[in-house]
Amino acid sequence: MTDTRRKIRVLIVDDSASVRMTLSEIIGADPDLEVMATAADPYVAVERIRQEVPDVMFLDIELPRMDGLTFLGKIMSQRPIPVVICSSLAEAGSETLMQALEAGAVDVVAKPRVDTTQFLQESRMRICDAAKAAAHAKFRGVHKPPPPAMNIEAKLTADAIIPPHSDARAASVRAKQPDTDPIICIGASTGGTEALREVLEKLSISSPGIVIVQHMPEKFTNAFARRLNGICAVEVREAADGDVVQAGRVLIAPGNQHMVLHRTGSRYTVNIVDGPHVARHRPSVDVLFRSASQVAGRNAMGIILTGMGDDGARGLLEMRQAGSYTLAQDEDSSVVFGMPKEAIQRGAAAKVVPLARVASEIETYGRTALRTGTMT
């Protein structure tokens, strides 16, 4: 039987013929995607867009005749299209990519790596997932038909990194859990960089310690953390193994590694660990949230923000069941409502709030939770 579903149409803009060919092969091999056209520079891309508007555009930053950042600004001001930045600058953690996200790009991926079969496979997964997520992205004032349904592939759960507690053991841990300072755990994906900026900019230096998983490329998380650190009252840094979670500090999981919360006495630290992709991501929100459910429980607050897929939904439910206070971002303020929607449908979120209220929820929790579980 012929598959008549409409595929997500992708425009590739890159001056390298080999990159255009590799991206075309990767995207064209996915049953949910098709390459609408390719272009070697923004001027050719404009002509292609005049003929047919793509669902998603993959855009390099370093381009001839007009740089990608300038082109992105023009696209966003004249005819917004979901844009995924695909650049070698991602591997260097370039500040330019942060500017691209602030200008309206919905995601950033590194150019496909062909060093080994594993790296190529991971590049394929990340690129195709980014295209599908971008197709779901919303722009204020822009209305478009919903993207086509996608194939659902099997994926590993947090069991691959952290064994689950049995029901009896989980109940025993909850009963014996001493009070500690509150801790905030946040997960986000597509659209999350700007959502996190909006939240963290509003926090005071006395806010609870925060640990974050944001899906993004390796090394780029360091540039992201540095940029936030320069505009926020709280200290923001890329997490390193053994870092202490404390009031006024935000730790962001490094790209391509999982972050696990660890507890010694009343102090929390983070462990940075390798391992397979969980829920198709590394770092995975589910891994962080499961660790928080097991070591923090009622002393923690879990928050799931904008993003595609279901990473974090299971973990947030585990946190709620362990006594944590849990939130999900609402649909209207989410660039992509996938992750919050999954969490809400599973009953993982005690409360659903717009992005503009997340910071105040964190501050209120830090002042009033008092480690008694009264906010669960």
Image (cartoon, rainbow, N blue to C red):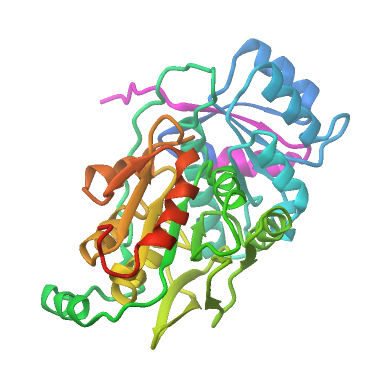
Q: Position of residue 84 (x, y in %)?
A: 61, 38
Regarding residue 156, the answer to whether it shows in the image is yes
Residue 129, percent from left and from top: 47, 44
Q: Residue 157 at x, y = what percent?
A: 31, 62
- The vertical placement of 53 against 100, above or below, is above
Q: Which of 118 and 327 is in front in this view?
A: 327
In this image, 20 relative to 292: left or right? right
In the displayed structure, 84 sits above or below 234; it is above
Which of the 4 image quarters holds residue 237? bottom right
Q: In this view, does 174 lie to the left or right of 212?
A: left
Question: Is 52 left, or right, of 308 in this rendering?
Answer: right
Q: Residue 223 is drawn in which quadrant?
A: bottom right
The span shown in magenta is 1-26
* Residue placed furthest toward the left: 168
Which residue is drawn at the image coordinates 73% and 15% (left, top)? Answer: 47
Residue 112 in the image: state x and y as whole percent. Answer: 62, 52
Please say whether residue 20 is one of the residues in the magenta stretch. Answer: yes
Rendered residue at 54%/44% (across/down): 195
Q: Which residue is drawn at 71% across and 55% down?
A: 227
